[in-house]
Every structure is written in structure tokens, then in C-alpha cells.
Image: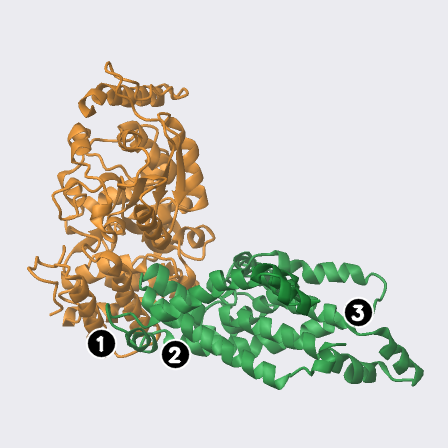
Chain colours: A green, B orange
Amino acid sequence: MAVRAGRALPFPARFVRSENALPLGLLAPTIIFLTLLILIPVAQAILLSFQAVPGTLGFEAYRRMVTDVAFADSLRNTLLLLILVVPVQLVLALAMALLIHSRFPGHGVFLYIFALPLAISDLAAGIVWLAIFADTGYLNSALNGLGLTTDPINFLSYENLHLLLGTVIVAESWRATAIVLVILLAGLQLIPREYFEAADLFGASRLKRTLLIVLPMLRPSLQSALIIRTIFAFQTFAVVLALAGRQLPVLSYEAYDWYYNNRNEFIAAAFAALILVMTMTVVFFYLRLLRVKDAELQR
Amino acid sequence: MRHLRMPAAFALALGLIAGACGGGPTTTPTASPGATGAAVSSDPFVMLSTQLNTVTESEALRSQILSGFTAAKVEFRGETAGPFADRIVAESKAGKGTVGVIGGLHGDFGALDLNLFEDLTPLATKLKDRGFPAEFMELGKLGTTRQIYIPWMQATYILGVNKQALQYLPSGVSVDNITYQQLTQWCKNISDQTGRKRCGLPAGPMSLLHRLIQGYMYPAYTGGLVTTYKSSDAAALWQEMKNLWQYTNPQSLQIDFMQESMLSGEVWVGFDHVARLVKAFEGKPNDFVAAPAPKGPKGLYYMSVLAGLGIPKSTPNKSGAEAFIDYMTTTAVQAKTLTTVAFFPVLTQEVSAGVPPHLKAISDGVQKQAKHADAKVALLPIGLGAKGGEFNKVQLDTFQRIVIKNEDITKVLSEQATILQAVMNDTKAPCWRPDPPSTGPCQVK
């Protein structure tokens, strides 16, 4: 049919009737959207980061970025949060997903409870946890009420950096585990029941089923979840801002600070470019590490 | 056309005063058409402001103050400095705007290209009987011959003190006349005797710590800011800051507004902007007293923060915007501004009608500060344009490095002074008070 159309019709009509038309047509809105709202702004931001000295292209913004007082700390904290938060969330989300997937009576209620943080904005979540961890917050009041402490514990002070980091990890884990859970749960539900029936037939234990069927079959979902979570971890901002203020600088806060408070879009763009490069590097490693074979995708 | 609107504006002002005094609903005789039909356009416009941009302040402004202006519908939009500047520039570039009036600090205007604003000299002439201090009107010109903004409201920074703290004052020291060293001793006494660090400095991400450094501490110790940035007097200041920090509530690094921490009792002695202390006084009026800022070897320097109202050239309703500025600077509305949002009037005449006790208490502290024998005024940075943020960052980074990270004072001051000088050279800004006037860019000595 395509051949016949190719001979008889002018270009637009020929294209519309060709086999490529439908997939390209369906992709077009996404491609246009991504180009206009993501690709072009990203290119502009990267260009901006090289234009700190008017009229020339150079590395001045990057030089000022790396010599900035907060640069080393913000880089360290961002990586630290990434390394500490992502595994915690992955394990928690997997446990929660398996719990719900086991379809025990009342599992639906747990899904709603677990997914609740998804509906709350980052900053609101940060403020909720601030109310818990502040000197006169709920946790200190409870500890005091139980007679465990006399003076409040300074959870949120740079003097106890480990505690401070701990509170941020708890808050971040609470806030963003749900998104991982939803992805993993969807992946779990895609695993054909036949595998489990076969496993039952051979008398596989629950542990064996999890290790030999669930985890390998869940790899595509794990990959997506890891990528999304890592991108989010690089962007961690509001929760840290609410809980730690300036005490725990992170890269995305520095980008914000340079743009809004210091009014220097060039250095802000340099920070943004750094976040982009780091995110892409990590995502590249995930893709290599957890490479999903075509056969698995076609499942 | 302008002079014909005078009677109308007067009628408007009188109506408001009468309304406020009578306590009844303000029936505003809106700038009604004059004999020739010259009228204030009723086209709606947006008031874009960097001030009063918290939810409670915005709501108070909308319901208590904007509602009294009926000549045109005014929609209030509070913004932070970044988006504020972006929107004005964007509307100007588009050649079509929705923002009719701009409310901002002196520095917010200075950060923008002054050609974006209407010249308000005729309006200033018309309003000259209001009694704006000449110094404020001069500031409103931002060094040009054009009136860029009309003074709107002012504020300053003082000490908010929980009465429980007074018993720990060093002996013989009055809370109304205290040095930075005595403040440190006071905070040490509180910490030693109650076991808790109850002095607070606002040092959170949205705090105004840089203003305390620029307008209070640096001038009080060095008599200047830029010129004396790395002087030996400055080193003495930072040493004192380190001493003070030992007895300062460590949560200060998250405190943006001192009032919450003061209400909860975590902080007893807090140094902050009056608008960021007011809720403490309002919540527990009997618990707090307001005291002047501490003084240093060179005197009690304080910063008077001036906010103004300007009109962008892209305004959709110029006559409405002018009538609005007229309205906002009447005595009645100035009193209402103090009552509802705790910003002080910019008029020389007494504005005290209906001012509640907690504001009276703060007002007393502000007065004591201004009338203090060693009091001297420092100004907000002038002429830095968009580099104002980077200028602030120099002081904040200095604080971070010396006080929090314990780096060597001389080394940090020398390095930060280099960055400071680069900012000054970029902007070519001459020195402002308390630094002595300069011809070229202000130089670090």
C-alpha cells in the first residue's frame, strides 16, 4: 500500500498514509513539548553559564562557583544525601510494595497510607517535619513528657551535623518513598501470575520466590525508580531548606540563592549545569548497570 | 489636568480621615471628575511589591487598606526581589503592563534601570504638604534629578526583649543603653544561669542578618562599612561576634523571623527588623519590651529602612496609580499601615490615632533608638543595582566563615574584601553613609 501511495500521491498525503505517520504523530506533542520547555531552556542555561563576562565566552562563572564559600559543602551534602537517601528509599519502597502485593486483607488501606506523602508539597512536608524536630517541637515535647529528657535535643543545629543530616534523611525518605513504591508496585503487578504458580508447584519458599522471580522480573521498574529518585535527590531543596536553612547547603539551593538572592544568573546557570552533568552521569551508570534486555522489555 | 485633580485628592484624603475618626465605614469620595471632566481612570491595575509579601501581611493590606481605595480596582501581588525585578523588566520589554504601582525598598528600585520609572516630580510637588522628611524625598530620587519613588513606609531594627531576661543584665547596665560587649555578657549570664542559650540572631536563609552587619555592627565598630571592611576595628568586631555567637541559640541559623522563636520562649533577646518582631509583642504584649540596638566604640548606628511607591512607565493606569500613591500617604492610611502591618509612617507629623499598645511599645523602642545620645543613621546600600545581592553575600559569607566555620579573621577579611572591591568596581557605586563620600567607586582601605 505504501508503495502504491508513494507513486500516486504528493508528499503530505503520502506521509499521512505511510506507516511512520501514526507513531510520529503520536510522539509529536511530546517532542514539541520537550523541545520547547526542556531542550531549549537547557541549552540556553548552559550557554548562560559561559557568559559571565559580558561579550565573551569563558569559564568565569565556573571559577566563581568552585571558589564559592558554600561550594564544597553543598557538593558534599548533595552527594551524601544521594548516597544515604536513595538506598533507604529503595529498600523501604520494595518492602512496602511486597507487603501490599501479598494482598493480605486490608492491603488497600496501606496503599493509601503509604501514598499519602505524594499529595503533599515538598515545602509543606519540610515544615511538618520542622514542627516535629524543632526545639519545642512534637518529638522533644514527647521525649520530655515521657521523662526521657529534661532539656530539648537540638536536632536541627549545625553543632550536631549528624543529627541534622539524620532528620533530613528521615524527612526526605518519608516524603519521596511513595513515588518509588508506586513504580515498583506497578512493576510487581506486571509480573505474570504463571511464574508464581510454577514456583508454587515446585514448592519454592517465599524468600526464593522473591529472590529468583520478583527481583529479576522487577529490574525494569527498579531502573526507572532509581533514575527518577536520583534525579529528585539532586534536586532536593525545600525539605532541606525548611529543616536546615543555611546550615546544610545543597547544590540546588545554591543555584536558587545565586539567582534570586544574589541576582547573578551566570553562576546560578553554572550550578544548574553542574547538577545536569552529575545527574546525567549517574543515570548513564544506572542504564549500563541495570541494562534491560529487549526480551525483558517485550514481556 | 494634574492641578485640577488637587481638590479631588484633598476631598479623598479628608474623607478618609473623617471615615477613620468616625470609625464608620470609609465612604471614599473617589477622585471624582473635576469641572472639566478630568478624571482618574478606573482601569484596574496590579500593585507589585517586595514588601508585605507574607500571606498575613498581604491579607491585611488587601482587606484593611486597599479596600478603602475605590477609584480603581487594585490587585496586590507580593513578590520576592528576583521575580519582582523580572516582571517589571518583562512588562517594560513587552510594552504592555498590568503592574500600575510598584512598592519596594529603596534598594529594590536601585536594582532596576531607573528609566523604567515615571518621573514623579509633579506628584511630589502636589504632595509636599504631607510633610515627608526632605532626606526621604532625596533618597527617592536615587541620585537623579527625577523623583523615582514617593516614600511609603519605614522600618528599622531593634532589640526585642523578654522581661524574664532583664534580671540577667550585667550589673549597672540599662537595657536602653547597652554595648555589644555588654550584650555578649548578658547572653552569657542567661546561658550560664538558665542552662539555655536564649539570645537570637536572625541568620536563616531568608533572614536580614546582612542588614544587621551592614547598618549596625560594622558602623558601630569601624565607623564605616566598605572603606573599613578589613580594618583592625573590623577584626575586633568579628572577634566580638564570635564571642556573642557562643551564647547565641544555635537554631539562629534557621531563624528568618525572630518573632516565632520569641513567642515560643526559645529566644529571650532577639535582634531583628520590627516587622519581624511584632507578632511576639502582639501575642504576649505584657512579656516583651523593645530596646534600642546595641552600640559600639563608634556609636549607636542604626539603619532606617525606607520603602517607596513608584510607577513603571508600562503602567496601564497612570492617573489611577498617582491617585493611589496620594491615598497611601494620607495620615489616616499611614496610621492604618502602622496598625495593620507594623511599618512606620514616613510623615513628620504625629500619627498615633488608634495605634494599639503592642505597636506603641515597639514604637517607643524605635523612638528611644532614634533619640539615643550616640545614635547615627546608616543607609541601605545605594547604587549597587543588580549587584545588591552579591554585596550582601560578601557579609554573609564573612559571617559564615569567621563565626560558623571558625576560619582566621584576618585571612577571611582580606579575601572577602577583594570580592567586595570587585563588586564595588563592577557597579562603580560611590560610598554611602556611614562611609565618607567618594568620587569614584567606593574603595576598601
Q: Position of residue B73 (x, y in %)?
A: 40, 30
Residue at (29% x, 60% y) in the render: B389
Residue under pointer 1: B415
Q: Which quadrant: the N terminus of chain A?
A: bottom right
- Judging depth in this view, the residue of A234 and A83 nearest the camera is A234
Q: Which quadrant: the C terminus of chain A?
A: bottom right
Q: Secondary structure at mark 1?
A: helix
Q: Secondary structure at mark 3?
A: helix
Three-letter code, disc 1: Glu
Discs 3/1, front: 3
Q: How much space separates mark 3 and mark 1, taking CA atoms?
A: 59 Å
Chain letter of the residue beneath label 2 in the structure image: A
Residue under pointer 3: A101
Residue under pointer 2: A72
Are dots 2 and 1 on a single chain?
no
- Left or right for A88, reference B234: right
